[in-house]
Image: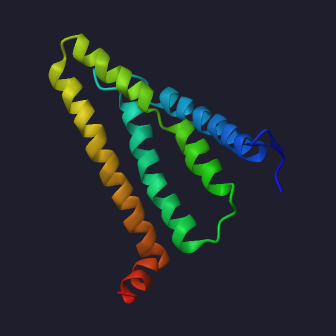
């Protein structure tokens, strides 16, 4: 059993913190590789869409393919992908675009991120089910 101090699962907090640090470092690396060019913050869009794709993959893997350890989902989903994606930066960038008078860019970035993120989740789920063969097993039970 994990250490528990006053109702706090120390192991759970530890894996989330470790995963968050890893995810944030990877996000920083993407920002270095894709520096800001033009009005659209492509590095933020890239990490958020990639993170959405990976959460779709992860959720299929840990709910339909693997018998996952109880700390895997918090480590990868909340920690790594939570640290990798950045909705607060996205919101700030939308605000900056709108306040600077770049209304079209701001609204396009606002809606485009949401739409591409949702598409990425669906693609991640679908591709993972197709590759793993779980789509056939799920469909057979209907």
Name the image quarter holding the C terminus: bottom left
Q: Residue at x 23, y 24 (%)?
A: 106
83, above or below 140, in the image? above
User: In the current view of this chain or complex, which residue is farthest to the top?
Assistant: 100
State left or right for residue 50 relative to residue 63: left
Q: Picture coordinates of residue 141 (x, y %)?
A: 40, 88
Q: Picture coordinates of residue 129 (x, y %)?
A: 43, 72
- Residue 98 sits in quarter: top left
Q: How is the rendered protein coloured?
A: rainbow
State left or right for residue 113 relative to residue 36: left
State left or right for residue 66 relative to residue 55: right
Q: How many labels does the image show?
A: 0
49, above or below 107, in the image? below
- Residue 126 sits in quarter: bottom left
Q: Picture coordinates of residue 134 (x, y %)?
A: 46, 78
105, above or below 19, in the image? above
The residue closer to the viewer here, 95 or 2, is 2
Q: Which residue is drawn at 28% across and 21% down?
A: 39
The residue closer to the viewer here, 52 or 71, is 71
Is any part of residue 68 visible from this angle? yes
Q: Residue at x 49, y 28 (%)?
A: 31
State left or right for residue 53 relative to residue 17: left
Name the image quarter holding the N terminus: bottom right
Q: Picture coordinates of residue 116 (x, y %)?
A: 29, 46
């Amino acid at each position: 059993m994990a250490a528990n101090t006053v109702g706090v699962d120390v192991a759970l907090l530890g894996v989330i913190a470790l995963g968050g640090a890893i995810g944030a470092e990877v996000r920083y690396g993407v920002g270095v590789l894709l520096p800001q060019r033009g009005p659209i913050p492509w590095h933020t869009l890239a990490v958020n869409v990639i993170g959405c794709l990976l959460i779709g993959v992860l959720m299929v893997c840990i709910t339909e393919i693997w018998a996952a350890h109880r700390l895997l989902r918090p480590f990868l989903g909340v920690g790594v992908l939570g640290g990798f994606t950045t909705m607060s930066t996205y919101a700030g960038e939308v605000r900056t675009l709108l306040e600077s008078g770049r209304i079209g860019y701001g609204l396009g970035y606002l809606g485009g991120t949401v739409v591409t993120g949702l598409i990425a989740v669906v693609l991640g789920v679908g591709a993972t089910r197709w590759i793993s063969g779980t789509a056939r097993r799920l469909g057979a039970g209907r």
